[in-house]
Amino acid sequence: MKARALALLLLAAGAQAAPGAPSALPPEADVRRVLANLPALRQGALNTQLAGAERDKLAASPYEWTLRAGASRRSAPGAERYREQEVALERPLRWFGKAGQDQALGEQGVTVARALHADAWHEAGRTLLRDWFDALRELAGVARLEEQLAVTQRLQAVAARRVQAGDGAALDLLQADTEQRRVLALLQQARQRSEQTLTLLAVGYPGLPRPQADALPLPQADGEATASWVQRIEHMEHMEHDSHELQLAQAQADLHAMRASRLASDAMPDPTLALRATRERDGQERVIGVSLSFPLPGAGRAADRSAAAIQASLARERVTQTRLRVTLAARRAASDSVHAREIWTTLQEVQQHTVRQAELMQRAYQAGECTLADALAGRRQALDAALAAQTAQIEALAAQARLQLDAHAIWSID
């Protein structure tokens, strides 16, 4: 049943958020509407219609009836002259099952066009997913830097009060002001990158809601689902429908094989059937006849058959190559999902430790128990840890979303 079993596995393992819980992804209805309106996917829909027209053309046959008519004058000894007329109706005929082969070729062409459309939809979904999480990553970075800027402003205010009270050195105020400006510069750069990613989403995907990074869900532990993924991937060579890319390669290979078979049938050329009627000697003689004419096959037909057979072999090799690439990508996606969550868990613990350390050093500075340089160093470590943990969280969410997308659990054209 294609990849539905995979979707159920992911759902059972909690890979998707419960109803009402925060989600890192845009609403599916909005995504489907946006994807359907992308120029590349509208072009794919038109390409499917074009394949349908080509199918109808093949079913109707490329051959047409030809009507021939002629008139002549016969002169006989004795000065007798006669008017004579001739009419012929002729048409080449597809035989030895060629009509059925052409019809099957047309249907396979439609299958290839649909597979192309489905693969383009899936790739567009991957691109949207990547652009969406890029925007989330930049927005989250802006939020963390805004928090850090507020902290440096408080430290700068404390340093200023201590200098005014005569309890602090002017160097402390200079260091606090420098750190504040450094964080402000980082924030300005992050805002610029964030605006660029949001502009990309707004222009590339009109109608898609703005991503929100203030309430991201936690990455789910999905070890059981990943184990099921690995087990299923091992048998993927028997399940072309699990991958649009593999389905497309197989459909194209089948089309090339059918074309090679059709050209092999042309080793026996199609005959031309003609019905002839003549009126001779002013109608004194009437002739009705039937004729068959056959082209004599030459080296050109043999070369066409050889080229088609080679193309079919190349297409089969592309299927094998695509299967290996899809299997490797699926294994990597499953592995990335697990490792990304493990990395996030570790970095989250590091963040918690550095935040506690920075808070203690800030209170120690306010109490005069440590220097401002030590407090600022602790804050920088906390900022780096917060950014790393936030990035790891988004990377883990992106890896799990990619797993769901490739499993056709979300945004599937099916």
Image (spheres, helix red, strand yellow):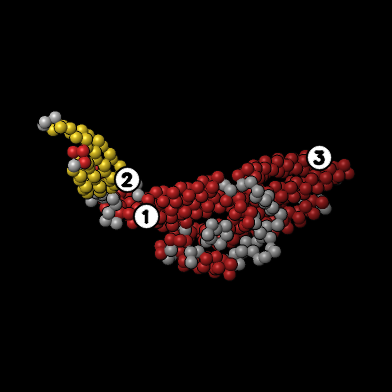
395 or 205: which is nearer to us? 205
Residue 202 is situated, as x and y percent measured from the top left of the image, at 65, 45
Q: Which residue is mark 3?
A: 170
Please report the residue visible at 39 percent of the width from the left and 49 percent of the height from the top: 57
Please report the residue visible at 49 percent of the width from the left and 51 percent of the height from the top: 117
Q: Nearer the viewer, mark 1 or mark 3?
A: 1
Q: Residue furthest left?
A: 77
Q: Which residue is mark 1?
A: 103
Please report the residue visible at 71 percent of the width from the left and 54 percent of the height from the top: 214
CA distance for labels 1 and 3: 88 Å
Along the horizontal axis of the image, is 113 left or right of 25?
Answer: left
Do callouts 3 and 2 mark residues in contact (Cβ within 8 Å)? no
CA distance for labels 3 and 2: 101 Å
Which of pointers 2 and 1 lies earlier in the amino acid sequence? 2
The image quadrant of residue 191 is top right
Residue 184 is situated, as x and y percent measured from the top left of the image, at 73, 42
Q: Nearer the viewer, mark 2 or mark 1?
A: 2
157 or 394: which is nearer to us? 394
Q: Secondary structure at mark 2?
A: loop
Which of pointers 3 and 2 lies earlier in the amino acid sequence? 2
Q: Which residue is mark 2?
A: 65
Q: Amino acid at mark 1?
A: Gln
Q: Amino acid at mark 3?
A: Ala
Q: Secondary structure at mark 1?
A: helix
265 w.r.t. 174: above or below: below
